[in-house]
Amino acid sequence: MTEQRGSDQFRQSFREEARELLVELEGVLLELNERREDEGLVGRAFRALHTIKGSGAMFGFDDLAAFTHKLENAWDEVRKGRLRVTPELVDLTLAALDRIRTMVEEEAGETAEDSTAGAEILERLRALTGSTAQGVSEAPPAPAALATSVGEPDEAEKSGKEPARCWRIGFAPGPDLMRSGADPLLLLRELAGMGTLTACAGVDKIPPLPELEPERCYVSWELELKTAASEDAIRDVFIFVEEQCELTIEPMDGGADHSAGLISAGLIAGETPCSGDVIAKALEEKRKNPGRRTSDVADAASSLRVPAARLDQLVDLVGELVTVQARLSQIAGRSEDAAVLAVSEEIERLTSSLRENSMTLRMVPIRATFEKFRRLVHDLARDLGKKVELTIEGAETELDKTVIDQLGDPLMHLIRNSMDHGIEAPERRAAAGKNPTATIHLSARHSGASVLIAVEDDGGGIDREAVRSRAIERGLTKADAELSDQEIFSFIFEAGFSTAKQVTDVSGRGVGMDVVRQRVDSLRGSIEVNSRPGAGTTVTLRLPLTLAIIDGLLVTVDDGFFVLPLASTLECVELTRADVERANGKHVANIRGEIVPYVRLRQYFAVGTPRPEREQIMIVESGEGRCGLVVDQVLGDCQTVIRNLGRLYRHVQVVSGATILGDGTVALILDPQRLVQEAVAGSHKFRPASEGVHRAQRARR
Amino acid sequence: MPVIFDRAATPAVLRLEGEVDIADARRLREILLEALGEGEGARISLETATGLDVTAIQLLWAAEREARASGIVLALEGPVPPPLRAAVEAAGFGRFPFADSGTEEGAA
């Protein structure tokens, strides 16, 4: 069972790497479609394919390795300038990537239908590459063919186009190489596939049986490889084990002449494996004179791949710790023992650092999620007969992995809708004086405790009236209701609100849009839609940076406790009865000369008890501008483990969750964003500060 | 299980089957230690083995060296499948473990 788990784990880590490589490759191919002569991109495509093939073979994905090998050969032709990058080649390679993706996910035993699909791709590839790529029809060496492949001239040698060189390779696996799932013999097999390989194993370091650690590798190799491949290609074979081995690669004097080799000088005569000393000496030299890869090795060794589930577990534990720490602080606060208080403060400080650290572990850039839409846009544009360019901004923006994982679907629906309904056909765009090539702009940026992700298109915009009449027709609103643009646009997210038939082609947004709202709601986010007829639409998703633990400010309203996210709170100002009276009953405060409107939470929550003499205004930055939330008291900051309120409360949008305080009391976590939005929606008199200031400025002019 | 130890046979027979790799290394080491510890030697059958990884090869190597040093007979039973021998030799193990340990290779 354990072995099975181990092997599954290695296959799983290969899958993860392959998925990343496939996304990267897809991006490279789509870029290549734009810049067909870019040799750098061709090189990247080739290397990615090579890595997928190599590591696939290493982890037992033989079919995948064989398939990718053929694709790699075609790209090798491109790299050597014998084949040109054409849209057909790009499309075919993209189709092949889909096939590889399926093979990566498959356990074993593909269906015949899949095989046919793969064979068809290879057939088309063969037709495309024609006679230039002999290798497209060749399979990589099979495991059993190792012995025969050794000593056979390589492909380039047969064709006589590339001069073969001789390389001496010193390869000493580190002690943990085998435990990481790598197998040196598979690497040797891959080298053998590149040309003529002579291997000599150093067995001197194998200890006596009682001292031998069975999972450790004690053998090192001295290899001679005659190949037309470059040093980089040789080094690529070791790409997955680089940080776990010592590797030297150097050309042998005398070019392709084997006579200079140590191995051919008699050591391979078959009597004994070569002495470990020879290898040790070579590696010692390498240590004295480190090559250019040393820093790469250090970089690789400084990062490691950890299953997301383990991080989730860590964050859960930290969450528990934070809750217990809050209890400790409260108890220590009541104690008069200075030592207990000191320890409690120290633990609070450490817990806080631990929390911050563990949260950053889960933060990943949104790049991969964004990049995969290049393919969607490319394919959809082709299918719809539209010209669309995807631009990306802020791909380095980081957010919690759990948030990112759930973003794919909503973004996909938004992009599909933009492409399908928002963006006009090229002729129509040209007729309207627009660039026939439309643009979809995907962007991400931080804003306080949130991340703003926007999908912007320069299409026809949403037909406000069509949406409005459809909403009236469906009974979602009354015919005489006065609705803001935001309110009207929000109808497009209603379940089943729009299909192409139900709303005119001009507006038409809405297919799958209910999915967007559901997902964004479940992430405690919000959606904002802006659209101008003829100019385009921007849908902005505001999402929390994290779903687990936040820094909050604990406040009270009457006898209730509430938490406001610290990141969205700008400052805290006292509000006296005199201040209130000076405002003549209006809910505005003068903050250093700026008029800021506020919402009194007592009033909002319909608390009947008399309000205290002095209240506090928490100034928050919302998407609408600056506004205040008036509370009774601010108790201080607290680390807040967010708990879900459950399905029953999912419609209470101003509350984004709950947390348990040190003494077991439950405090609701408020969403200032939503509070302000609801206040704006509920009262047309309520306008956040920026808007108010603008109006005042306009009035002064 | 690719590593089977038949203690009832005289001498005992260690049979390696299919792909023997790191997952079997710990058990293989225990069995080899047991076989050598008893001082009566053992025979090793690779007839149905299809692959040996480095951990298996180095264990067999160490066992063979140990047996030779202490005068214990650790020999092959039956032939080694040619592809297996070729693969191990191509990986730089110029002589396969036990190839020179006596006349046992190929013996029934």
Image (spheres, coloured by chain):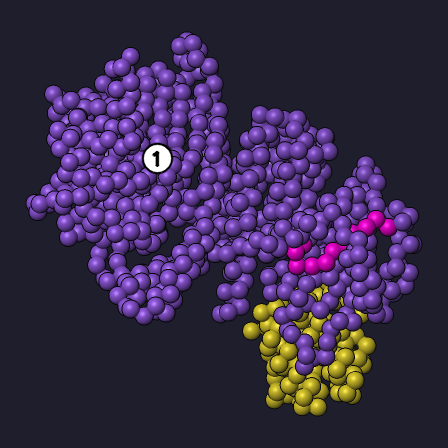
The residue that appears at 40% across and 40% down in the rendered structure is: A408
**Where A37 falls versus A523 (above or below)?**
above
SS assignment at label 1: strand
Q: Which residue is identified by label 1?
A: A541
Q: Chain B is drawn in which colour?
A: yellow
Please state, as top left, top right, bottom left or bottom right, where the C terminus of chain A lies in the image: top left
Direction from residue A278 to residue A649 in the image, left or right: left
The residue that appears at 39% across and 26% down in the rendered structure is: A456
Can the viewer see residue A532?
Answer: yes
Can the viewer see residue A682?
Answer: no
Write down the quadrant of residue A129 in the picture.
top right
Residue A203 percent coordinates (x, y)? 77, 70
Q: Which stretch did the figure color magenta?
A: A240-252
Direction from residue A169 to residue A362 in the image, left or right: left
Residue A262 percent coordinates (x, y)? 88, 59
- Residue A247 drawn in magenta: yes
Mark 1, other Cα within 10 Å: few <14 / some 14–19 / many ≥20: many
Residue A463 percent coordinates (x, y)? 28, 19
* Viewer-side residue, A455 vs A144: A455
The residue that appears at 25% across and 24% down in the rendered structure is: A692
Q: Colour of chain A?
A: purple
Residue A372 percent coordinates (x, y)? 48, 37
- Residue A654 drawn in magenta: no
